[in-house]
Amino acid sequence: MTGRKLSTIACVLLSPWPLVHVQRQHPGVPVAVLNEARRVIQACPLAQGLGVQPGLREVAALSRCPDLHAEVVPAPESRAIWAELLEQLYARYSDRVDGQRPGAAFLVLSAPAARDLAAALHAPVGLAGSRELAHLAALRAKPGEVREVGSGAAEQAFLRLAPLAHLGALAIPPATAEKLHFLGLQDLGGLMGWSAAQRESFLGVDVGKRVNRFLKGERTNTVEKYSPGQILEASLSFDAPSPNRRRETRRCVTWYRRWSPTCAAASQPPSLCRPRRWAAR
């Protein structure tokens, strides 16, 4: 009896988000994302090379890099742009798309489709039989390229060389990865040399058990079907002056935020949304 061929899962990385989106809107120039206090929270490598670091005030960042393009991207707007990208991935590539965390999207794709996706978005794409492996592969791929992970011995060799900085794909916090580096470990291979009890003791019970299950072969090899049309639109209008207009507006905005995570900023009525378009190259 012939078994059904397993689907391959692709992970496309567009992180840190929304910095990647701002970079695409302003190619070739140093860019940074600011918070509402006008401090840098994300900066591209070009800007960082010119002295722009997270935490700097906008004025200080511009003094170090006069050509810097810096802008505030409110969280609701960032989510709206990401949601629109997911809609495009669903329409063009697969009916199984998951992008719960902005910056990383998982799709069920063939190898040719994965290469097309990487070229279209000029983004790193990992391709494997599970979400975890696809994520680790994407972290080691170059923009516009696909890194594919095989099975068996090839998979084990790939895992052993996974850098500590990439272990967030296995839910290992960055602070823990730094501690492992302090102990002299360089990659996942060093952690694989520990016993299961040692990993649970150092990583903590929850993370340690999750890593142990992964190393024993437990994988997430499915992507749920995507539900299109999750971006809601709404507007406010008042036919006649109302003494309770402010309260009514506040109630509408509260309802809108509750049912649509991709709405405009909370300080503005939904009718003032100015969604941006994400366009594949």
Image (spheres, rainbow, N blue to C red):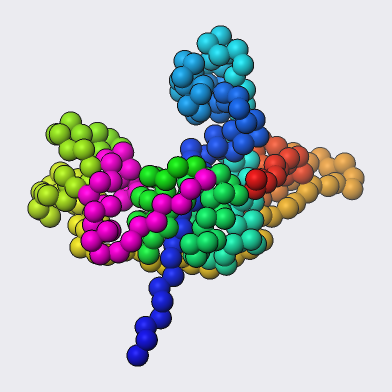
The answer to if 260 sits in the magenta stretch is no
Q: Is residue 21 left or right of residue 252?
A: left
Residue at the spot 31% in from the left edge and 38% down from the top edge: 165
- The x, y position of residue 247, in whole percent, is 72, 42
Q: Total label count?
A: 0
Location of residue 123 in the rendering, given as x and y in whole percent from the top left corner: 52, 45
Asked if residue 67 is positioned above or below residue 32 in the image, the reply reads: above
Which of the two residues, 160 or 170, is positioned nearer the viewer here? Answer: 160
For residue 152: magenta? yes
Quarter where residue 216 is shown: bottom left
In which quadrant of the rendered image does the C terminus lie?
A: top right
**Screen quadrant of the N terminus:** bottom left
Vertical arrangement, residue 223 with respect to residue 63, above or below? below
* View extreme (top): residue: 63
Is residue 67 found left or right of 46 in the rendered image?
right
Q: Position of residue 68 (x, y in %)?
A: 59, 19
Q: Residue at x 38, y 51 (%)?
A: 137
Q: Quadrant of residue 248?
A: top right
Region in magenta: 144-172
* Foreground of the two, 210 or 277: 277
**In this rendering, does residue 52 appear at all?**
yes
Q: Position of residue 22 (x, y in %)?
A: 61, 34
Asked if residue 251 can be seen in this view, the reply is no
The furthest residue to the right: 240
Q: Nearer the viewer, residue 134 or 264?
A: 134
Residue beneath the point at 54% across and 34% down: 19
